[in-house]
Image (cartoon, rainbow, N blue to C red):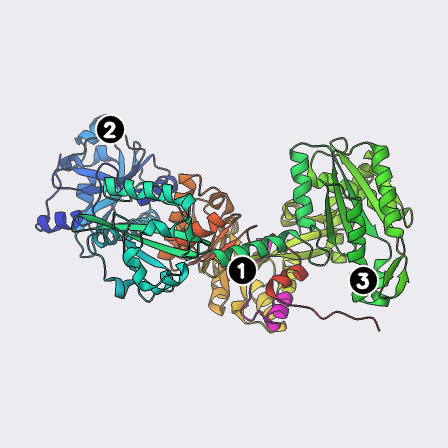
């Protein structure tokens, strides 16, 4: 067995290693996701970050490692740090250096090894990132070496953060230079909670004078309900000499001098000085953010014209009822001939009619019912615990009678009728979309029978619908008749909360089944001959909408467009997009093209060339659903990307799953390493917003800010008001 060489500058190397303050027993938590990524990426059972000490080695992070000899003389990594490049051992049993190594001949049965040396900023060897298998591999390629080296850069970045943190705890900067002029409240205090320093932002937030710090304890700035937990946290930190491993709240309630309470984002740090622990609290006022959140929630759930629930809120209510499961009946109400009223009397009269109809229907809705305006002149009502056909049809009769009462609008006496379709669960449907669709089918039947009619859903209506439709033919008709439309989901800056853009999402406004979500038709569309045609329509429609919004106040608005794989194989996608930009007077920065890993891997050379041309022209390229595939790292390195979108499946559970949190953290680190922007999908809570902001994610998208919505509704978020025709 050949022992690893010892460096001539070994004392300096060991001193550099000590400068990281690594705990040999606990390792470094931030490196755990990296070794898991390495293990998964190369399909190896073992991956580790191995640090080389004086006479032994220790793991800063590892996965799949059992009981092994940690002596330096048998360590493969101790050999790897003597090299400048990746050390690869395809089969240790046939390698002169390792064939009789205990790790090879013993229970560990090490056969394959690949390791990248890790260095301090001064170039001193610290350890290695390695992957290991109990099977030989003679197919470890140059590309694999490159991918492993890219991962080692992530390790080096995280080690450097640890070094800075470890050393900053030993030497703290002067407060005046560090935080005095910051717009964020910063407070330093000692073990007895006495305030050492606070900046002007903190003084103003809490309503005190600067000299009050001499008689004020930090915990008195915290709301009484939150003080016990905070003091327990501080006492634990004092006892162990660190905040490492302690659960620090991300939000806390503060108490002003006038006894009013404020809600803050909260960060806590500590360092040692003259044997005593000092603390630093950084606070961010969340009051304005809370108001914005409430406004976004209102916009996402409420129809602006009538104050009723909107379509999205109604669908959620139906879904919650069906899942419970609770019996219920859905009524879909459509005003007869309303378009004629709008055209002849103007939208101002039309809007007043809609508001009055909303008030009348609200009188009939029960306490636990949900009444919604679905859009245009269509309303919907969900009545829980109503399944009796006689009672349901009686309510339908009352609805039509109430709508038909004379209306006095701006001195004009008007009469209007409505049609109604109704369906019940669980007898006629077991899913929310099915139940609403059944009621829509019944409405369609009622309207065919004439004005002022209602119809109760029966099974033969669905059979008729199935017989009418043949999916492929319907898609052709949808294209020919212009039945597709775009919804827009807001994308916001996590730092400012402002809308920066939107993702354009296709919907199918089916004439009989109503509005269909992408899951209902995209698989068939993508697999058929119409994908490129529909993709071209999406590009033109999204560009037209973007141009309108940019001309009317949202000057820097950016639109995200999802591309179909077929668009890269049919026609000239580059020319098509450039022509669309020119047609609508848009700069290339106005568009962001979204591609998934599946598309990229489908036809590598064609896709790469096209994306490179588009990127060179100035368009942004986003990698969608990032984190769900296996080739992501190499794609980040080679493809002309500008942003990665972190998949919602990781984001939604990152606060409760350490594994998902680690994946999100690793993705963000990779993005920063490649100078890519980031946007997280699936943000539904303020806690997720704050966590991602703290992790330095740039933007967010999710139900917290708004569901996909029609253009007119989205314009309200942007503060854009369209001019309306007024009756003469």
Q: Which mark is residue 67?
A: 2
Sequence-wise first label, 3 or 2: 2
Taking depth in this image into account, of 596 and 162 the one nearest to the observer is 162
Tell me where the magenta segment starts and ends, as one range. Answer: 543-566
**Residue named by callout 3:** 350
Q: SS class of the residue under badge 1?
A: strand
* Label 2 CA crowd tier, 10 Å (few <14, some 14–19, many 20+): few
Instruction: Determine crowd level at label 3: few under 14, some 14-19, many 20+ residues with C-alpha closer than 10 A.
Output: many
Q: Distance between the residues labelled 3 and 1?
A: 39 Å
Side of 279 relative to 229 (left or right) = left
Disc 1: which residue: 593
Q: In which quarter of the image is residue 36?
A: top left
In depth, the one of 71 and 176 nearer the eye is 176
Task: Give the mark nearest the N terminus, 3 or 1.
Answer: 3
- The percent position of residue 280, horizontal first and vertical second, equals 30, 53
Name the spot of residue 593 as percent of width and height, x first: 53, 60
How far across and down, in percent of the image, does residue 689 sit? 47, 51
Q: Residues within 10 Å of mark 1 (few under 14, many from 20)?
A: many
Residue furthest top as drawn: 107
């Amino acid at each position: 067995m050949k022992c690893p060489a010892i460096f001539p500058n070994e004392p300096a190397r060991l001193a550099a290693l000590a400068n990281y303050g690594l705990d040999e027993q606990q390792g470094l938590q931030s490196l755990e996701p990296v070794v898991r990524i390495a293990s998964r990426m190369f399909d190896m059972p073992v991956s580790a970050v191995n640090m080389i000490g004086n006479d032994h080695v220790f793991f800063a992070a590892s996965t799949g490692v059992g009981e092994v000899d940690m002596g330096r003389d048998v360590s493969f990594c101790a050999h790897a740090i003597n090299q400048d490049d990746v050390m690869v051992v395809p089969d240790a049993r046939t390698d002169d250096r390792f064939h009789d190594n205990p790790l090879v001949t013993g229970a560990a049965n090490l056969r394959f090894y690949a390791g990248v040396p890790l260095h301090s900023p001064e170039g001193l060897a610290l350890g290695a990132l390695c992957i290991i298998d109990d099977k030989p591999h003679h197919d470890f390629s140059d590309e694999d070496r490159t991918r492993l080296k890219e991962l080692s850069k992530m390790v080096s970045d995280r080690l450097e953060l640890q070094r800075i943190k470890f050393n900053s705890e030993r030497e703290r900067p002067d407060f005046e230079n560090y935080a005095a002029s910051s717009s964020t409240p910063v407070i330093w205090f000692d073990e007895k909670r006495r305030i050492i320093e606070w900046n002007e932002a903190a003084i103003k937030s809490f309503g005190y004078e600067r000299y009050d710090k001499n008689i004020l304890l930090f915990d008195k700035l915290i709301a009484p309900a939150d003080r016990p937990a905070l003091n327990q946290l501080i006492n634990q930190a004092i006892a162990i000499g660190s905040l490492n491993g302690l659960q620090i709240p991300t939000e806390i309630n503060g108490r002003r001098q006038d006894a009013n309470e404020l809600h803050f984002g909260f960060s806590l740090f500590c360092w040692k000085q003259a044997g005593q622990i000092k603390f630093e609290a950084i606070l961010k006022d969340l009051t304005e953010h809370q108001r914005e959140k409430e406004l976004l929630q209102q916009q996402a759930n409420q129809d602006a014209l009538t104050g009723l629930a909107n379509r999205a809120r109604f669908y959620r209510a139906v879904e919650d009822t069906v899942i419970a499961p609770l019996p219920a009946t859905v009524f879909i109400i459509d005003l007869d001939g309303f378009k004629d009223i709008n055209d002849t009397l103007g939208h101002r009269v039309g809007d007043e009619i809609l508001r009055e109809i909303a008030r009348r229907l609200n009188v009939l809705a029960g306490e636990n019912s949900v009444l919604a305006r679905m859009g245009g002149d269509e309303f919907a009502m969900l009545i829980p615990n109503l399944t009796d056909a006689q009672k349901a049809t009686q309510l339908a009769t009352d609805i039509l009678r109430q709508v038909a009462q004379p209306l006095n609008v701006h001195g004009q006496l008007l009469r209007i009728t409505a049609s109604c379709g109704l369906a019940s669960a669980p007898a006629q449907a077991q899913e929310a979309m099915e139940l609403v669709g059944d009621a829509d089918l019944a409405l369609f039947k009622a309207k065919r029978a004439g004005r002022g009619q209602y119809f109760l859903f029966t099974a033969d209506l669905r059979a008729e619908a199935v017989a009418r439709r043949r999916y492929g033919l319907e898609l052709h008709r949808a294209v020919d008749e212009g039945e597709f439309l775009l919804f827009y989901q807001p994308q916001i800056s996590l730092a400012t909360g402002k809308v920066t853009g939107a993702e354009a999402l296709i919907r199918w406004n089916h004439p009989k089944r109503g509005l269909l979500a992408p899951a209902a038709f995209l698989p068939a569309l993508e697999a058929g001959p119409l994908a490129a045609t529909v993709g071209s329509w999406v590009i033109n429609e999204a560009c037209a909408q973007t141009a309108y919004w940019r001309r009317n106040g949202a000057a820097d608005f950016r639109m995200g467009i999802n591309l179909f794989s077929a668009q890269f194989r049919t026609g000239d996608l580059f020319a098509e997009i450039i022509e669309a930009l020119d047609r609508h007077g848009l700069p290339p920065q106005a568009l962001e093209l979204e591609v998934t890993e599946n598309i990229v891997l489908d036809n590598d050379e064609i896709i790469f060339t096209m994306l490179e041309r588009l990127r060179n022209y100035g368009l942004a390229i986003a990698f969608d659903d990032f984190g769900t595939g296996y080739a992501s790292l190499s794609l980040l390195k080679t493809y002309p990307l500008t942003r990665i979108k972190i998949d919602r499946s990781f984001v939604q559970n990152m606060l409760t799953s350490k594994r998902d949190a680690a994946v999100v953290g690793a993705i963000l680190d990779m993005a920063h390493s490649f100078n890519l922007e980031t946007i997280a999908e699936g943000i539904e809570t303020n806690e997720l917003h704050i966590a991602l902001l703290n992790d330095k994610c740039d933007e967010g998208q999710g139900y917290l800010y708004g569901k996909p919505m029609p253009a007119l509704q989205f314009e309200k978020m942007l503060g854009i008001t369209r001019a309306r025709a007024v009756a003469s």
